[in-house]
Image: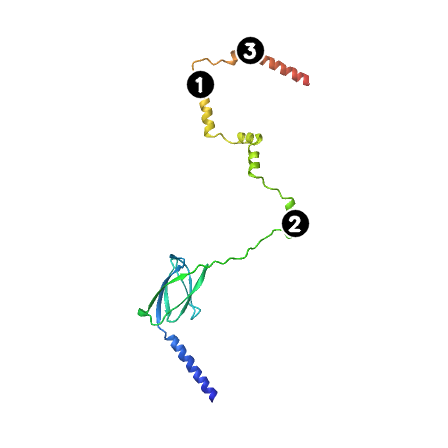
Amino acid sequence: MKRFIVIVISLFAVSAAFAQKQERPLVQFTGITSNADSIKAVVPYVSITDMATHKAVNISNYKGYFSFVVHEQDTLSFTAVGFAPQEIVIPTGVSSKSYIAQVKMKPQVINLPAFRVFPWATTDEFRKDFLTMKIADDDLENARKNLNRSSLAAANSSLPRDANEIQSSLARDMHTNILNSHSLIPNPLLNPIAWGSLIKQIADGDKSRTGSN
């Protein structure tokens, strides 16, 4: 009998506590999540969990603003990546059934231990790759390679002329035309010495071809 009375009293106590919890007044909770180091800097998309139910989760918008309904004496947990968790308890007897708060989130920096990754499975593989490794040239060696005669000749034959080279060539042509504007340009076809030199070159070429046969 005594056991039955204890069970009944316990049920009444639980029912009373549950009813008291359900009868807590509702409050419109509104606020902004900001950075504790800078009040003007807001913290967007903060997760707000009602610890009384562990199910009601709200998120502040991209400006850090939030507004939702809670009960008095509810504990709200604010969490965000890179910030320490913050908790706020809704007070009792809130006037006008509205509670406004500015939640200051403290930045949290976590220093992780250094982790070094080696691409070699054993020290023998590392020693082999190290001994066969080709060391990159320094700036002086690169400049020496780029300024040698073969590199400059290759660049001169492959690269197009720039504006300065074109302007210099045009200036030389204009200067030559001005010098020869009042003089007769000799025609090599009318020069007998040139004809004699040409005939000699042809004859020498015939003899060289005959000798080679």
Task: Give the Cα distance between marks 3 and 2.
Answer: 77 Å
- Image coordinates of residue 8 in percent, x first then y, are 44, 84
- The foreground one among 8 and 51 is 51
Residue type at mark 3 is Ile
Which residue sits at x=55%, y=11%? 193
Q: Which residue is mark 1?
A: 177
Residue type at mark 1 is Asn
- Image coordinates of residue 80 in percent, x first then y, are 44, 61
> What kind of element bears circle 2?
helix
Q: Which mark is residue 195?
A: none
> What kind of element bears circle 1?
helix
Which residue sits at x=52%, y=14%? 188
Tell me which numbered mark, 1 or 2, is placed earlier along the sequence: 2
> Dot 3: few (<14), some (14–19), or many (≥20) neighbours within 10 Å?
few
> Dot 2: few (<14), some (14–19), or many (≥20) neighbours within 10 Å?
few
Q: Which residue is mark 3?
A: 193
The C terminus - image quarter: top right
Label 1 or label 3, whichever lies nearer to me, is 1
> What kind of element bears circle 3?
helix
- The foreground one among 171 and 32 is 32
Tell me which numbered mark, 1 or 3, is placed earlier along the sequence: 1
Q: Is residue 135 left or right of residue 179?
A: right
Query: Does the CB distance between marks 1 and 3 fall below 8 Å?
Result: no
Residue type at mark 2 is Glu
> Dot 1: few (<14), some (14–19), or many (≥20) neighbours within 10 Å?
few
Image-quadrant location for residue 179: top left
